[in-house]
Amino acid sequence: MKEKILIINKKYNGWLIPSLLLPLWVILYWNLQQISNFIIDDIFRMETGAHLTETLRFFIFEVPKVMMLLVLIIFGVGIVRTYFTPEKTRKILEGKSLFTGNILASLLGIITPFCSCSAIPLFLGFVEAGVPLGVTFSFLIAAPMINEVAVVLLVGLFGWEVAAIYITTGLIIAIFSGWIIGKFKLEKYVAEWVFSIKSGNTEFQEEKPTFYQRINSGYEAVTDIVGKIWLYIIIGIAVGAGAHGYVPADYLSSLLGNQNWYGVPLAILIGVPLYSNAAGIIPIVSVLIEKGVSLGTALAFMMSVIALSLPEIIILKKVLKWQLIATFVGIVASGIIIVGFIFNYVVF
């Protein structure tokens, strides 16, 4: 009897708690600007327009805004991910033609958990399942570059239009980069031992999660992901706040504005050696745009930092030869340059 009551309470709380918290989230989110202004102007009584004042105002407003968006979206994505286990992802991609596989792999990369440390296990799992090399690379490009953290930060700091642009162009880069790699037939540049691994033929029946388990997965995703990236977010917003308050707009716009053809390649050269995730780099990019850096250049910088991070390249060196890594970096960097120029000189 007690066990039955416990199960009922779990199911009840599964939808009750989010239902009660959502209205509070909406009220708080839409009043964040007024709250931050109240803290700066009425509590601290700081001088309006001063460098330090505007730096703190930016920081106090952006940190809770980004955190609240992350919690909401990651909770939803955590539930969605219960429908896409790594095994299901590999099964979906098995046997697909090259271009169709590239599209599916890129779309699945958005909702599938990924970080640089999982690059090798994912790569090996796809190769074992017979997924083509080009399709595998589409997934590896899309997963870190277009994830829920990046989308939330882009929406919160730039709005839906820029977020949609980033997602669309990121998908195009992932799809066509993987397709080109597949067309080049570069399997010979994969470490020999990789293809000697044979995937097992063991079939097993996956247990379908209950509604409560799916809701609980959303809670776990929030605590896991936010717990790992909150410090990056605060550091990134702190750097952005400092630039917002102190860096002259004319300096950055003269160096990386769309009037300079070398702005996009320079941004990529600066970005590739850096290591950061979306949580750390996007708040900084927000301030770059505010200070006069063109949208295409800013997007190119952000994509190069996230999609071509040195840790991932170093990790992949364990399973790929340098010729394939160089091809991968060159193709993705070329795609990013094209995107940067398009948005600098054609769209915006």
Image: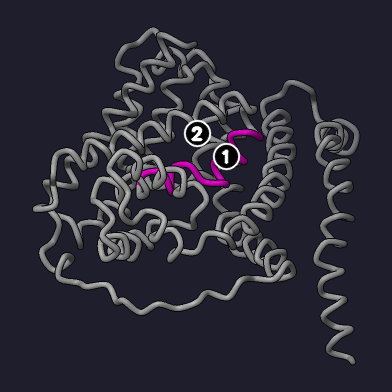
For the residue pair 69 and 216, the one nearer the viewer reads as: 216
Residue identified by numbered label 2: 167
Residue that mark 1 sits on: 151
Label 2 neighbour load within 10 Å: few <14, some 14-19, many 20+ = some
**In the rendering, at what x and y percent does residue 203 appear?**
40, 77
Q: Vertical placement of 342 versus 54: above or below?
A: above
Q: Is residue 283 left or right of residue 39?
A: left
Residue 1: image x %, image y %? 90, 92
C-alpha span from label 2 to label 1: 8 Å
Crowding near the residue tagged with mark 1, few <14, some 14–19, many ≥20 C-alpha atoms within 10 Å: many
Q: Earlier in the sequence, mark 2 or mark 1?
A: 1
- Do we see residue 97 in this rendering? yes
| SS category of the residue bearing label 1 | helix
Identify the magenta region. 141-156
SS for callout 2: helix
Tell me whether the residue at label 2 lies in contact with that at label 1, contact meaning CB atoms closer than 8 angstroms.
yes
Q: Which image quadrant is residue 178 in?
A: top left
Q: Residue at x 82, y 74 (%)?
A: 10
Counting from the top left corner in percent of width and height, residue 9 is at 87, 76
Circle 1: residue type: Val
* Residue occupying image coordinates x 57% and y 30%: 163
Numbered circle sitting on residue 115: none
What residue sits 50% from the left and 77% below the top? 205
Q: Is residue 151 magenta?
A: yes
Vertical arrangement, residue 245 with respect to residue 256, above or below: below
Prevalent SS, magenta region: helix
Q: Is residue 48 left or right of residue 190?
A: right
Q: Position of residue 161 (x, y in %)?
A: 60, 23
